[in-house]
Amino acid sequence: MSKLRQMVLAPRMESLFTATVVLFGFRLGARPIGDNSMFTHLRTGIDMARSGSIPRSDPYSFTALHHRWVVQSWFPEWSYGWAHRLGGYKLVVLEQAVLVALLAWLVVRLARAGSPLRTALAGITAVGVGTALWTPRPLLFGLICMALMISVVERRRSPWLLVPLVWLWVNSHGSFPLGLAWLGARALGEGLDWRAWPRETLRYVGWFAVGLVVSVANPLGARLLSFPLTLGEKREAFKNIVEWRSPDFSRGGGYFALMFLGLALVLLLRARVGWRDVLPVVAFFIAALAAARNIGPLAIVLAPALGRALRRPDSAPSAPRPVGTGVNMRLNRAVLATITAAFVVFAALIFSSDAVDEVGYPGEAAAYLVSQNLFDTPHQVAHQDFVGNYLELRYGTRVKVFVDDRYDMYPISVSRDYDQLLGARSGALDVLDRRQIDVVLWQKKLPLVTLLEAKGWRETFSDKEYVVLQR
């Protein structure tokens, strides 16, 4: 009997819990797309699907027009573009929902502790740490690749499976060095635990390296492997990006992640975990404190450590358990039917609601600028970085933006100029003059608006949040 058929006919508590967490992941990913980074990834994919080629230079800005651009996440963007071509933005949302559900399933499988309640505690804790950072963007592909890699190592599957997995990872997201970091920490921990050379894990390291070599066979060549080095070269430009800063645990998703992270540390500290769990968790915990974007990978690293920490010494997680009484089976089937119905409802909601969330973006102000031809030559429009992402999705190459959040692509001079404008520093007016900018679309609450009004710039459009100023 297949596992799926067995689950339907005789669903067990652990399977029901797993299905519930997968449902949670599906609902989390089924939200309308509102992430500004995803806007540019989506636009790039749409243009790729239409043209059949990957851009090699920037087509969207006037400050870095035709500047060399390594589209590091070309594979996810290609999938977005074709999903959009086949079913519009709503099919893209469905893709994101399936990806988050898959990630949740992989994390729960890694957290299995030998009993339904212990697996539930380990799985919920790991998923709770990461969900605030599981946003709809190519990072999801990287997180899934990381979870698959850890699954291969944890279950001692054939190491050659890492070759296609690493190829996918390299061609999807620049986080692939985290895989080597985890393997290195794991191998060192096993050496300390066993007082022996960790031959098995080092085999996986070797096959990971083979995967890196094979990954050069891609439309962009070896530049994808060197892409993470550009982040170090442009560290200065990343200081304005929230997810590259130390996490703010005092609000929103940060508080949610902190609560589950505290629970995870309590569970690990009270158990006798080995160095093979301690070293990877400590390494990724330090990385998460340095940059909020590393909280997502930390959640995956925590999953197997929590599973072992909560596992009883005499438990056998893979051993079959009694099916239970007829009453329990009927109850379990009813729960499974409810979960299945919820999947159908959430999928239907995707196709019955807006697929793009424009709240917080200057839709009316952008429409005004287009109607007045202010994006056309000889005008140059300055705006905030996330606004650039929004303009790219909405108008594509029809308008040329000042900046967006692709800080790895822009020359450092553009990032410095944007920093001057964002803080309304002493050189802000010089930036506007040097860049020949005569129109500014900006949030009212920021000091640049006050500075420009004091210098005689006139307001030509205003709504509750944004203002358009012209020389």
Image (tube, rainbow, N blue to C red):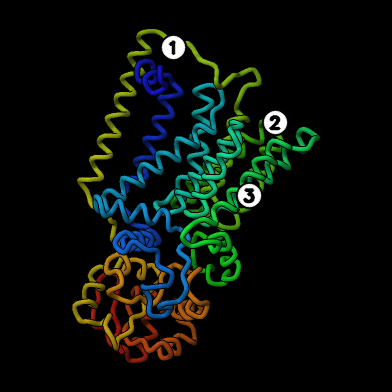
Q: Which amino acid is tagged 1?
A: Val
State the image coordinates of residue 398 (x, y, percent, origin top left). 27, 74
State the CA–CA distance, disc 2 to disc 3: 32 Å
Q: Say which of 176 and 16 sits in front.
A: 176
Give the quarter of the figure containing the C terminus.
Answer: bottom left
Q: Which residue is disc 1 drawn over?
A: 323
Kind of residue at disc 2 = Arg
Query: Which residue is under mark 2?
Result: 272
Q: Quadrant of the N terminus?
A: top left
**Relative to 200, is 280 above or below?**
below
Please tell me which residue is depicted at 46% across the width and 49% down the height of the picture.
141
Which of these two is toward me, 465 or 86? 86
Percent coordinates x, y for residue 297 in the rendering: 54, 47
First of labels 1, 3 by sequence position: 3
Residue at the image position 33 percent from the left and 13 percent from the top: 330
> Between disc 2 and disc 3, whose residue precedes?
3
| For the residues bearing labels 1 and 3, Cβ distance under 8 angstroms | no
